[in-house]
Image (spheres, helix red, strand yellow):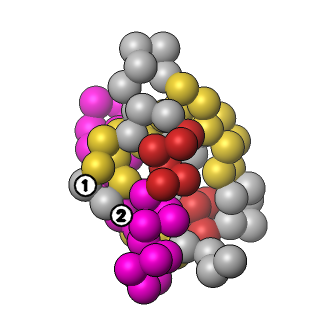
Amino acid sequence: GLTVSGSDDGKGLVVTDVDPDSDAADRGIQPGDVITSVNSTEVNGTDDVAKAMADAVKSGRKAVLMQITRDDSNRFVALPVAKG
């Protein structure tokens, strides 16, 4: 339910679009938010997020914990991972 792109400074991923019907929207993620880590692993590209999601599924997790930065404040959001 998220579309992301690399950030200007190379740290994290900027959320560019959120599907209004997605789990991400339900949890308050908005365009402009920056995802800085997934499951305590720093992310700097879409491959990092894909790997963290795949690792979570392999280990049987039902969700990933994303660290989101908005307006110089950090928060953590648990997002369910899709099976398959």
x 61%, y 38%: residue: 4
Disc assigned to residue 65: 2
- What amino acid type is highlighted by mark number 1? Ser
Using the image as rendered, state which of residue 52 and residue 64 is in the foreground.
52
- What amino acid type is highlighted by mark number 2? Leu
Give the mark toward the camera: 2 or 1: 1
Using the image as rendered, state which of residue 42 and residue 75 is in the foreground.
42
Q: Is residue 79 above or below residue 66?
A: below
In the rendering, at what x and y percent does residue 80 appear?
52, 75
Quarter where residue 21 is shown? bottom right
Residues packed near mark 2 inside 10 Å, few (<14), some (14 to 19) or many (20 plus): some
Does the magenta segment cover residue 13?
Answer: no
Using the image as rendered, state which of residue 48 and residue 20 is in the foreground.
48
Dot 1: element: loop
Dot 2: element: strand
Asked whether residue 75 appears in the rendered view, the answer is no
x 39%, y 80%: residue: 59
In the rendering, at what x and y percent does residue 25 appear?
61, 60
Q: Is residue 60 above or below residue 22?
A: below
Q: Name the residue under label 1.
A: 40
- Asked whether, in this view, residue 27 is left or right of residue 59, the answer is right
Magenta residues (range)? 52-76
x 25%, y 54%: residue: 40
Q: Is residue 37 above or below residue 78?
A: above
In the rendering, at what x and y percent does residue 10 appear?
41, 19
Q: Which quadrant is home to the N terminus?
A: bottom right
C-beta proximity under 8 Å, tags 2 and 1: yes
- Asked whether, in this view, residue 32 is left or right of residue 41, the answer is right
Alpha-carbon span between mark 2 and mark 1:
8 Å
- Please give the count of numbered marks on the rendered protein: 2
